[in-house]
Image (cartoon, helix red, strand yellow):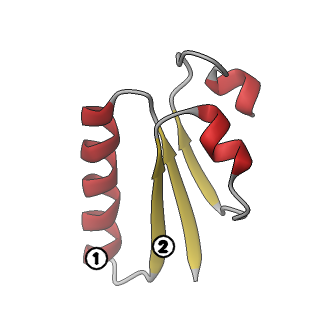
Amino acid sequence: MMKIAICDDNKYCNEVNERFVKEYLQEKDIKAIVQSFNHGNQLLKSDERFDIVFLDIDMPGKSGMEVI
């Protein structure tokens, strides 16, 4: 099963992106786990290995570029 991470410090953007991704996956009948993170550090501390990461570049703490 595919694992997808969404990381954005803006809660609204995180919710919109997660909803969009889940709707797309459902339309295409793709099984996946979608997990959201509010900070780059949260994503880095996760034990999960993700197949796809949607990452905000401009975040406080660790920027998206530092997370990459």
Report the quarter where the N terminus lies: bottom right
Q: Which mark is residue 67?
A: none
Disc 1 is placed on an element classified as helix
Q: Are marks 1 and 2 in contact (CB under 8 Å)?
A: no
Mark 2, other Cα within 10 Å: few <14 / some 14–19 / many ≥20? few
| Side of 51 where 13 appears, left or right | left
Q: Which mark is residue 26?
A: 1
Q: Earlier in the sequence, mark 1 or mark 2?
A: 1
Task: Identify the residue at horizontal 33%, vertical 77% (top origin).
Answer: 28
Q: CA distance from mark 1 to mark 2?
A: 12 Å
Report the label total: 2
| Side of 57 where 31 appears, left or right | left
| Side of 37 where 18 appears, left or right | left
Disc 2 is placed on an element classified as strand
Looking at the picture, how far across and down is residue 34, in whole percent?
A: 45, 64
Task: Identify the residue at horizontal 59%, vertical 49% (top origin).
Answer: 53
Residue for badge 2: 33
